[in-house]
Amino acid sequence: MSASDRWARRTRAHLAAVTGVVVTAGIAAVTLATAASAASGCQVAYTTNTWSGGFTANIAITNLGSPLTGWTLAFTLPGGETVGQGWSATFDQSGPNVTAASASYNGSLATNASTGIGFNGTFSGADYPGDPTGFTLNGTACTGSVPTAPASPTPSRTSSPTATVSASPSPTPSSGSAGPAVQNDVFWKDTAGNPIYSQGGGVLKVGTTYYWYGAKYNGAVTYYNNPGAGKNGDTSFNAITAYSSTDLVHWKFEGNVLTAADLGGAGWVGRIGVARNPATGKYVLISQLDSELVFATSSTPNGHFTKAATQSTIANVVNDMSGDQSVFVDDDGQAYLAFSNRSGRSHLYVARLRPSDFLQVEPAVNIANSSAGGREGNIMFKHAGTYYFCSSDLHGWNASHTYCITSSKVASGYSAEFVMPGTDADFSHVTQTGLAFAVNGSAGSFVVFGGDRWSDFAGNGIGYNDWMPVTFNGTTPVFHSLSQWSVDAAAGTWSVGGGNNYVLNPSVEADRVAQSTMAGWTSSANVANHAGGHTGRWSMAQSASSAYTASFAQTIALPNGTYTLSALVKSSGGQNSANLYAKNFGAAELDRAINQSIGTWTQVSITGITVTNGSIQVGVSSNANAGNWIYADDFTLVRTG
């Protein structure tokens, strides 16, 4: 089966216009220069993935006119569709009329620059009503018109960065999946359009409904309202929230199931899990509460929980209490606490919850010890009879590789530690292990890795919750780092989303600290991460105090098709050459010149990249003079056809 066959998906595509790039034979690279004066115009590509009663729409917007500092896209839905959760824009709907206003981080669109937005929607009736037939951008009809006197592409030869093969495995979707899209790298919203606040929690499936519990911290609200202000240290507890979903995308807010007042006032509350006790029929919530554990019960999974017990020590544990923890429920309904020890977190444990009521953690079993530093963010899941205990580095709130051990028994016989494949190139999609749960359906099964980005306390980008599919090569779990993926929870299948960004570590946030080599990328001399990004804390920088060359590259395996490459850049200008580029995709290299002065974050793009060999190298290269510099951030490589 060919690569394109493996990646085939059912889509409906509407192109408001099609433009191309002409490459002259024999030219090593083509620089796509921005016209000094551009006529008004825009282009929209609207692509949908549909299923019974619902669809995901991915919208690629290209500004063909003068540079924009903010934009609103408007269109009309033809058949009574309803807009649900959206991303990368603020959506508003009045009857069939929809507007999408730019977010703070993508409002600047230079001439010929592109950005991607999207939403999940619903419709009534058996058949999808169809795509919008017209779009306007800031009131201008998107007819695909181009500047009347475009600048001719300027040939320029560029130095070639050293290629690297991505450490992340190529995403291999399960077959037959079609459903709503999980959109990562954004702040999630519930079905009422309100921000989802759920961190350090867990998911419990009851019947066909998934219940998601987590903590709402006051600092999370602050960061959501103004992420540009950076991280904060406000871990003060607001409530434990509960959300429910049958499709793992549309989450209904069930309420605050436990509040600070319920706990008689609280300092630290976190690392929350819920399990149903088979003997009592009660749902039992377990959480850290300052230096001890608290237990609360409810007769329903979404009902208000009542404090029932506390526990100040766990037997057989170094320093007597958990550091990080999660709740794991085995196939027989027995619940366990998976955790590392307080103060050091180098000892890993599994402890059974008292079977009669789950209101006590029984003496723990030390299943492994870490010789390479502490392990936190401890999670546990089971697949095909194998237990997996996974953790992160001891990095506070920051992103990490995911480290796992496995066994055929819940509390003994665990393997040596290994790094989960797929988590190395972008440190688990710039997250820390947060939660995990199995999705078992009529046609397949996989595990959802719920990564906590902790942006409120780490400042490493947009969004708190980033969930990824985990598949299995024998007993080896494989992490698929995706910005967008579709899921059919009933079938137990998933597929790569049409709006997925194929660049790993696109905002260079994964490394957490100053580095000259960034995760997922190959760098030459004179490259480092720079404290000051478009989103998050970091961006890529090329600079030196004497004349220099520099390269920053990533090689990506991906399905054949047409793509747009974009990045946010700043530049001193004055370089002999400096380019955003795409190469080794089956055709001549394409460049976008960035050796002019660019004082504010500006999106630059290369459109119409037709991949025919299942691979591409993207990056930034420069041949520069002393004191010249370039910053680049938020790389995207999105399929448009």
Image: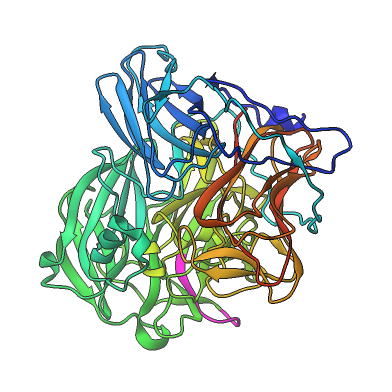
Query: How many numbered circles are shown?
Result: 0
Q: Name the foreground residue: 185 vs 25.
A: 25
Query: Is residue 308 found left or right of 39 in the rendered image?
Result: left
Q: Name the foreground residue: 504 vs 277.
A: 504
Q: Where does the image place residue 501, in percent across and percent down from the top left?
A: 57, 44
Image quadrant containing the N terminus: top right
Q: Where does the image place residue 258, in percent across and percent down from the top left?
A: 17, 60
Where 160 falls versus 106 (above or below)?
below
Q: Residue drawn at (31%, 74%), measured in percent from left and top?
A: 233
Residue 310 in view (yes/no):
yes
Picture quadrant where residue 592 is located: top right
Residue 413 in view (yes/no):
no
Q: Name the foreground residue: 243 vs 106.
A: 106
Image quadrant containing the C terminus: top right
Query: Is residue 376 found left or right of 94 in the rendered image?
Result: right
> Magenta includes 218?
no
Query: Which residue in the rendered view is the most extreme toward the right?
Result: 26
Magenta range is 370-378
Q: Where does the image place residue 254, in percent across and percent down from the top left?
A: 21, 45
Q: Name the foreground residue: 142 vs 124.
A: 142
Where 101 falls versus 462 (above or below)?
above
Where 613 falls versus 526 (above or below)?
above
Q: Residue drawn at (57%, 61%), measured in percent from left and top?
A: 508
Where 607 falls versus 123 (above or below)?
below
Q: Residue drawn at (59%, 68%), measured in percent from left and top?
A: 529
Give the colouring mode of the picture: rainbow
> Magenta includes 374?
yes
Query: Is residue 286 found left or right of 537 in the rendered image?
Result: left
